């Protein structure tokens, strides 16, 4: 009864199932091998014989056999037909599984200090990790108005091109047309002074933070970080074993004169001048000049994170720090995560001439290139005018959503929390009354299906302000008022 013809001839393949017949046959043979009903070395019936036996087409049997041969379940021997393989692949997988379960971790095989340091990096909010898309997740652009058709067309066009650069290892610091498009855009929109050679395309702002920090910070070096400040940046500094020194932010932005005394001078100063993360203030011109002067005095690099400056709703944008600097001391960074969509994983650094080669080498070492075809499609998206058109549309939409959110917070929460009215960006902090913990408020909001982030998490010192960080850019209008109503109910629970 162990003959393959007997076993397989008894199969009932069902043409009415959605699973194609060849796949049903493949599954049956595979499970007969794995269960031991078809033993190693057995000769399989010729495809013609089996097809007749099962009353199916011969091509169906050939397709199933080919798949089983490709995956190592069957072997084809010249002159003697097709046989069950001596060691079917799943046997190896099963054996591997059994061994893996028995392994006890060896304490000598531990994480590096860098690995341990990365484990200590806080997550912004538990719900964010759960992947809910709820009001008022921050950091999210609107995805529903992204021009998917245009994007699909551009991607497909590039994927069809035989241009070797899109398929080989040459990319280095980025696809040339994209570096050109970014340089042109940053010059016109952000007053950044650079040519395409200064633009380094990275796998997103987080990769830029990692790259820039690795290149200029040694373990123990002081890095000035905004207080409160962006956790992603803090993670990169921790991973480089930097000494993070929190420098307070006031209504004019990061204040170099308020840096804690007694510390070594900084090697790197990280800041978000266009729209401070998370307090949403714009750094004044006076403060920009003071910061650059301080950096020059001590020979520090400035890392300017311009993550969402495209979305400005009032007043004229101030020039980037990079555009004000005359000493080659500013490393500028931006991202497509907000202007296009987060999963695109494209960001850029603008570095002085003497840093370009180091960036190229570092990218090779760390493997942080985004895919060439995606870079090329983004270049086309920019050159053909879709990028600026999309930003223009999103700027108007986000301004409207910002106003809707602030109006709803003011009318439904009437002074119970104090929302900031930022000139730009995609989110705002809403400050809680004295004595109310934003952690408690965030947990209550989570129970009411409102996603907020506790601003106190962004502080390193104990002098924390408690506020809810509320995203508006990615929240459809119709969800804003109901979201604020649920937030109001949640805040009642914590006595607000
Ligand atoms: C301050 C800041 N920088 C950078 C980024 C963007 O990071 P990425 O391009 O890695 O998504 C964000 C996104 O939330 C941010 O808030």
Image (cartoon, grey):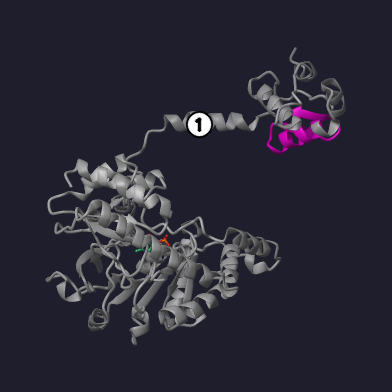
Along the viewing direction, whichever of 14 and 28 lies nearer the viewer: 14
Residue 311: tell me if it is visible.
yes
Residue 158 x/y as whole percent: 66, 65
| Quarter-of-image position of residue 276 | bottom left
Q: Is residue 25 left or right of residue 197?
A: right
| Quarter-of-image position of residue 206 | bottom left
Mark 1 — residue?
A: 97
Q: Is residue 356 left or right of residue 57?
A: left
Query: Dot 1, how many residues are within 10 Å of its Cα: few (below 14), some (14-19), or many (20+)?
Result: few
Residue at image coords 16%, 44%: 495
Vertical comparison of 266 with 105: above or below: below
Quadrant field for ligand 1: bottom left
Give the residues drawn in magenta, as a range: 61-85
Vertical comparison of 67 with 172: above or below: above
Q: Residue furthest front?
A: 411
Residue 74 shown in magenta: yes
Residue 303 x/y as whole percent: 33, 72
Vertical comparison of 187 with 278: above or below: below
Along the viewing direction, whichever of 25 and 454 lies nearer the viewer: 454
Residue 123 shown in magenta: no
| Quarter-of-image position of residue 76 | top right
Circle 1: element type: helix
Residue 466 x/y as whole percent: 19, 55
The quarter of the rendered structure image containing the N terminus is top right
Residue 107 x/y as whole percent: 32, 40
Q: Is residue 130 left or right of residue 231?
A: right
Is the residue at mark 1 in contact range of ligand 1, meaning its CB lies under 8 Å from it? no
Q: Residue furthest top?
A: 1
Vertical comparison of 330 with 46: above or below: below
Along the viewing direction, whichever of 336 and 354 lies nearer the viewer: 336
């Amino acid at each position: 009864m162990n003959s393959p013809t007997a076993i397989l001839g008894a199969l009932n393949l069902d043409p009415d199932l959605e699973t194609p017949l060849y796949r049903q046959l493949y599954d049956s043979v595979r499970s007969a091998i794995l269960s031991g009903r078809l033993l190693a070395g057995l000769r399989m019936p010729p495809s013609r014989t089996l097809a007749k036996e099962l009353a199916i087409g011969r091509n169906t049997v050939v397709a199933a056999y080919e798949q089983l041969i490709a995956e190592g379940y069957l072997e084809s021997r010249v002159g003697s037909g097709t046989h069950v393989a001596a060691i079917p692949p799943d046997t190896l997988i099963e054996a591997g599984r059994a061994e893996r379960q028995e392994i006890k971790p060896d304490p000598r095989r531990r994480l590096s200090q860098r690995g341990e340091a990365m484990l200590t990096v806080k997550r912004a909010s538990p719900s964010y990790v759960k992947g809910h898309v709820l009001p008022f997740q921050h950091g999210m652009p609107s995805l529903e108005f992204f021009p998917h058709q245009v994007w699909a067309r551009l991607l497909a066009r590039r994927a069809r091109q035989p241009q070797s650069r899109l398929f080989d290892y040459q990319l280095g610091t980025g696809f040339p047309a994209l570096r050109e498009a970014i340089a042109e855009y940053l010059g016109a929109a952000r007053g950044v002074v650079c040519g395409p050679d200064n633009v380094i395309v990275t796998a997103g702002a987080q990769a830029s933070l990692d790259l820039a920090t690795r290149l200029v910070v040694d373990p123990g070096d002081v890095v000035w970080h905004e207080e409160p400040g962006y956790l992603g940046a803090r993670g990169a500094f921790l991973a480089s074993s930097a000494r993070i020194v929190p420098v307070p932010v006031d209504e004019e932005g990061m204040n170099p004169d308020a840096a804690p005394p007694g510390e070594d001078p900084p090697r790197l100063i990280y800041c978000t001048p266009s729209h401070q993360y998370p307090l949403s203030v714009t750094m004044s011109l006076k403060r920009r000049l003071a910061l650059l002067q301080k950096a020059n005095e001590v020979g520090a690099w400035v890392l300017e994170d311009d993550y969402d400056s495209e979305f400005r709703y009032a007043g004229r944008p101030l020039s980037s720090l990079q555009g004000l600097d005359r000493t080659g001391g500013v490393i500028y960074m931006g991202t497509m995560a907000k202007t296009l969509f987060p999963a695109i994983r494209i960001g850029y650094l603008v570095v002085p001439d003497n840093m370009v080669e180091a960036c190229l080498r570092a990218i090779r070492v760390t493997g942080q290139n985004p895919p060439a075809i995606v870079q090329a499609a983004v270049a086309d998206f920019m050159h053909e005018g879709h990028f600026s058109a999309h930003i223009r549309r999103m700027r108007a939409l986000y301004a409207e959503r910002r106003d809707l959110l602030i109006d709803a917070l003011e009318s439904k929460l009437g002074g119970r929390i104090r929302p900031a009215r930022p000139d730009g960006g995609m989110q705002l902090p809403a400050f809680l009354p004295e004595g109310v913990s934003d952690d408690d408020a965030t947990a209550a909001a989570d129970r009411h299906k409102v996603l907020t982030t506790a601003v106190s998490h962004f502080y390193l010192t104990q002098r924390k302000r408690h506020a809810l960080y509320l995203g508006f850019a990615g929240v459809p209008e119709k969800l804003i008022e109901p979201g604020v109503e649920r937030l109001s109910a949640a805040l009642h629970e914590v006595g607000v």
